């Protein structure tokens, strides 16, 4: 579910744009987790979330970071590899490396929170991946399982952009863009709520295009006509009767509406 959004210029980096939202969010509660991508790597934010909000962070390390290099070297030296918990990743092994926070320090090292890492080794590609977390109680398997929630979130976002036409703006004016995004997200939220109802269970794991394709409307169709501040809602039969009683000039104005019913 989408609970908070923030708007800004495309010139502003995502991390800078979302910093206040993340640190001051009323949605995040003690014990929650935050799953980030590499673009949101910030020791300062991670420290504040853990110490002030009691929120744990999961984020992949960049390959040019010291914490990545050290975690990989320690994993190679200890060699305590275990199979990857995801069946489709048979070529990968995982290993928990504790207390690697010292290799990624903020401007105030004494205030840095502890960080553990899960190192993933792809035997086929000969590549290493490092996932960091401030939740030092988690095992390597638990770290991976938690971070693997991210693709599901990204898939939802992809569907919002492609199927819900998030970026299909009809104007460059800020108010119009804001209205478009807010209304679209409200519609998306209602769709998610509907899928959690008894009636909507059959669409639980289906995208919007699939749901629309299989949806059969059992309710009577309505026709809404509006102009300025005024509008009227008719059932289809009422609209046909109204249409038939109108002059040809008025009918020509109503024809585009009738063509959509």
Image (cartoon, rainbow, N blue to C red):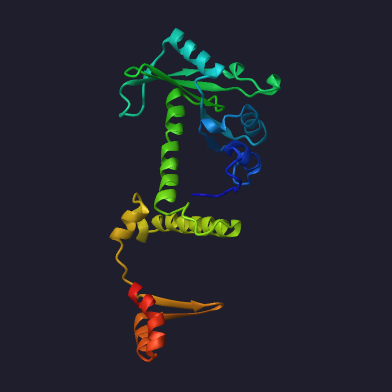
Q: Position of residue 164 (x, y in %)?
A: 42, 54
Q: Which of the 4 image quadrants contains residue 198? A: bottom left
Question: Looking at the image, which residue sits at the far top?
Answer: 77
Is residue 34 visible in the rendered image? The answer is yes
Please report the residue visible at 31 percent of the width from the left and 62 percent of the height from the top. Answer: 215
Asked if 243 appears above or below 159 in the picture, the reply is below
Q: Is residue 87 left or right of residue 44?
A: left
Please report the residue visible at 45 percent of the width from the left and 78 percent of the height from the top. Answer: 225
Q: Position of residue 55 (x, y in %)?
A: 59, 35
Q: Position of residue 177 (x, y in %)?
A: 55, 56
Q: Which of the 4 image quadrants contains residue 129? A: top left
Q: Which of the 4 image quadrants contains residue 45? A: top right
Asked if 16 appears above or below 64 in the picture, the reply is below
Depth check: 12 or 240 in front? Answer: 12
The quadrant of the rendering that contains the C terminus is bottom left
Is residue 261 visible in the rendered image? The answer is no
Depth check: 179 or 211 in front? Answer: 179
Q: Is residue 185 left or right of residue 53?
A: left
Q: Is residue 79 left or right of residue 228?
A: left
Q: Position of residue 104 (x, y in %)?
A: 60, 20
Please report the residue visible at 54 percent of the width from the left and 32 percent of the height from the top. Answer: 39
Q: Is residue 78 left or right of residue 171?
A: left
Numbered label tally: 0
Asked if 188 appears above or below 247 in the picture, the reply is above
């Amino acid at each position: 579910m989408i609970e908070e959004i923030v708007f800004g210029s495309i010139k502003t980096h995502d991390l800078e744009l979302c910093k206040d939202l993340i640190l001051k969010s009323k949605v995040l509660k003690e014990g929650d987790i935050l799953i980030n991508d590499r673009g949101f790597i910030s020791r300062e934010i991670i420290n504040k979330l853990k110490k002030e909000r009691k929120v744990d962070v999961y984020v992949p390390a960049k390959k040019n970071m010291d914490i990545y290099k050290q975690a990989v070297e320690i994993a190679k030296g200890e060699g305590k590899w275990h199979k990857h918990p995801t069946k489709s990743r048979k070529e990968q092994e995982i290993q928990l490396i504790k207390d690697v926070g010292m290799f990624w320090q903020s401007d105030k090292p004494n205030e840095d929170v502890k960080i553990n890492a899960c190192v993933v080794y792809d035997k086929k590609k000969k590549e290493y991946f490092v996932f960091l977390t401030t939740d030092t109680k988690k095992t390597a398997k638990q770290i991976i399982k938690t971070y693997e929630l991210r693709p599901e979130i990204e898939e939802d976002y992809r569907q919002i952009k492609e199927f819900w036409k998030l970026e299909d703006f009809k104007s460059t004016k800020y108010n119009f863009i804001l209205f478009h995004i807010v209304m679209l997200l409200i519609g998306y939220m209602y769709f998610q709520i509907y899928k959690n109802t008894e009636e909507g269970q059959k669409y639980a794991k289906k995208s919007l295009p699939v749901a629309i394709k299989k949806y059969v409307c059992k309710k009577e169709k309505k026709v809404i006509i509006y102009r300025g501040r005024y509008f009227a809602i008719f059932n289809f039969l009422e609209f046909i009767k109204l249409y038939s009683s109108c002059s040809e000039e008025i009918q020509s104005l109503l024809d585009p509406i009738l063509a959509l019913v």
